[in-house]
């Protein structure tokens, strides 16, 4: 099998490669932190910016939506201008947009800056995962490296509330966005020193029409789903979904006729690749929706401070990291379908526990269920990502990495939109403000749990307690309903994995998609210098393919 990445002697990664992995873990950790750190900041943000219910959901959703919308474009762009170069451009953009978001003065401004932050973050995810595929050519080492990458992503998601809680204890809500600035500065310093550059000279130019079609399709479908979940069947969201599907169909047809498509449809011929993408998206749908209501329960039902709520998330962060690291070991000993299916069933059991959480005394059951959920999510996060990347040749790693990320991010965003709206709808239908509460306070409480908390602060103690008792009961009903929905989603995902992945054994999938022309020895490649430290690199293709080789170089290999 050909390789487009420089392999260390004997195909094994050395110290420089593992140091490169540590650098690539930085943006991965930051992006996952950004997706979850805002959960705890939401009540504080609402007090200052006074967003409407719709604006609140857009503040939460728009970041993940635009990451998902631009991932395919950015994955392809990295193949054309260089994956490390795109990573560094994105690093600068993330730093600047993070500062802008931190100092937003209105809900509208925050939505715009979160949108720009999502576009910037979309440059990082496919670059990090694709570079891992380039750097680690040994299948087992690649599986371990991707497990580390998945650990950072899962751990960052769980640790976001911890970090956010610490910041919110001492600073204003915008501080949660400034967290990424020093991380981005560190990445800018280290990336040129330890990461290789990768270019695909055969990639061709980006088709802007395809970019527009993919973005319009994704955003239209998501908008329609959000509105259906929030307000029920209505002509506008139904039309939006229909338009999104029509545009998506046009996008797919266009890709099939292009010499250099934005999305290579041949990748979907691999059953394991397609199945892993589907399961990633569906499983993350449950995680996104569940996470929103669980963090809300800790603060608004249990009355915890952001710091306390964040600390209660630490166990889930620990188990997700441990599960991701253990996943490749189990996958080497048992059938992949079995390991993935069992991990999803474990997560299903955790969601089922949420169904029995009650407003008073339900904290132990909630936390136990949350930990069990992350055991399953951490295991499948590592294996599913490795399966997607390992199913294609390295020169298509950018597209595979983008599709892997878009599945997870789109699933998470859809979960926040659909399940979050479902839980909010249950809350609105269930809450019954007690008699004697002022009309404006009752209306605020019926609109959202955040509104109830804000209204209660303006009432006398007895009236505030009565209003919050009703609101807590209604919010818990929403959490129970989400637990049922997520458990069903987990069971369906497990059944899908056991069915579609049953022929796979081991942590690493074979490279099933036919590659483009092979990589060439360093001595023959016009893009590599004869650096003695690379003398041990082995040839992966005949010399006549030299002109088709991708451009790959480490910083130490540049000519003066």
Image (cartoon, rainbow, N blue to C red):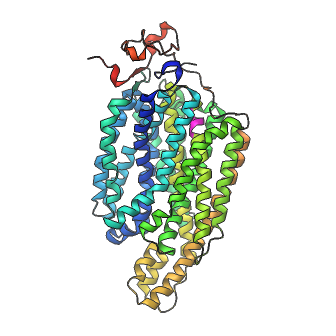
Q: Residue at x 41, y 83 (%)?
A: 440
Residue 83 in sight here: yes
In the picture, which quadrant includes the N terminus?
Answer: top right
Front residue of 64 and 250: 64
* 398 versus 68 height, above or below: above
Q: Image quarter for residue 42?
A: bottom left
From the viewer's perspective, tell me whether residue 316 is left or right of residue 182.
right
Front residue of 136 and 206: 136
| Whole-percent x, y for residue 381 in the image | 57, 45
Residue 262 in sight here: no
Q: Main secondary structure of the magenta part?
A: helix
Q: Is residue 374 magenta?
A: no
* 416 versus 409 height, above or below: below
* Range covered by the magenta-colored residues: 385-389
From the viewer's perspective, tell me whether residue 331 is left or right of residue 85.
right
In the picture, which quadrant includes the C terminus?
Answer: top left
């Amino acid at each position: 099998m050909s390789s487009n990445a420089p392999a260390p002697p004997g195909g094994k990664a050395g110290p420089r490669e593992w140091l490169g992995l540590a650098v690539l873990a930085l943006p991965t950790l930051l992006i996952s932190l950004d997706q979850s750190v805002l959960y705890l900041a939401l009540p504080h943000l609402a007090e200052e910016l006074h967003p409407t219910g719709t604006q609140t959901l857009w503040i939460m959703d728009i970041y993940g939506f635009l990451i998902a919308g631009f991932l395919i474009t950015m994955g392809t762009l990295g193949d054309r201008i260089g994956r490390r170069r795109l990573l560094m451009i994105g690093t600068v953009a993330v730093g600047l947009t993070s500062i802008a978001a931190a100092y937003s003065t209105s809900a509208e401004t925050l939505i715009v800056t979160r949108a720009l932050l999502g576009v910037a973050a979309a440059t990082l995810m496919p670059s990090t995962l694709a570079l891992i595929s380039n750097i680690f050519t040994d299948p087992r080492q690649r599986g371990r490296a991707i497990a580390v990458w998945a650990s950072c992503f899962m751990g960052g998601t769980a640790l976001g509330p911890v970090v956010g809680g610490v910041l919110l204890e001492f600073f204003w809500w915008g501080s949660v966005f400034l967290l990424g600035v020093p991380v981005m500065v560190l990445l800018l310093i280290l990336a040129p020193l330890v990461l290789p550059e990768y270019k695909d000279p055969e990639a061709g130019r980006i088709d802007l029409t395809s970019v527009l079609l993919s973005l319009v399709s994704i955003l239209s479908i998501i908008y329609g789903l959000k509105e259906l979940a929030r307000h029920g069947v209505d002509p506008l969201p139904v039309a939006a979904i229909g338009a999104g599907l029509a545009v998506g169909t046009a996008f797919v047809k266009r890709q099939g006729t292009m010499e250099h498509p934005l999305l290579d449809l041949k990748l979907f011929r691999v059953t394991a690749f397609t199945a892993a993408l589907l399961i990633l998206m569906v499983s993350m749908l449950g995680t996104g929706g569940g996470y929103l209501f669980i963090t809300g329960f800790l603060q608004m039902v249990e009355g915890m401070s952001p710091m306390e709520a964040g600390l209660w998330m630490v166990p889930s962060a620990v188990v997700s990291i441990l599960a991701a690291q253990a996943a490749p070991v189990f996958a080497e000993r048992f059938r992949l379908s079995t390991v993935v299916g069992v991990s999803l069933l474990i997560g299903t059991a955790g969601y089922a526990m949420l169904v029995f959480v009650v407003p008073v005394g339900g904290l132990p059951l909630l936390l136990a269920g949350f930990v069990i959920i992350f055991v399953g999510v951490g295991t499948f996060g590592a294996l599913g990502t490795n399966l997607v990347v390992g199913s294609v040749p390295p020169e298509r790693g950018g597209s595979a990495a983008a599709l892997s990320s878009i599945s997870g991010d789109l699933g998470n965003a859809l979960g926040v939109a659909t399940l979050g709206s479902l839980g909010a709808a249950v809350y609105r239908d269930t809450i019954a403000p007690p008699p004697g509460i002022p009309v404006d306070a009752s209306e605020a409480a019926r609109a959202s749990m955040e509104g109830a908390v804000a209204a209660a602060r303006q009432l006398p103690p007895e009236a505030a307690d009565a209003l919050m008792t009703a609101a807590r009961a209604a919010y818990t009903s929403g959490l129970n309903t989400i637990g049922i929905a997520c458990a069903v989603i987990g069971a369906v995902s497990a059944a899908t994995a056991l069915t579609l992945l049953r022929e796979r054994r081991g942590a690493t999938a074979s490279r099933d998609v036919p590659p483009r022309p092979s990589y060439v020895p360093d001595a023959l490649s016009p893009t590599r210098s004869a650096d003695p430290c690379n003398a041990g690199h082995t040839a992966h293709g005949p010399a006549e393919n030299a002109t088709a080789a991708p451009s790959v170089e480490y910083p130490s290999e540049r000519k003066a």
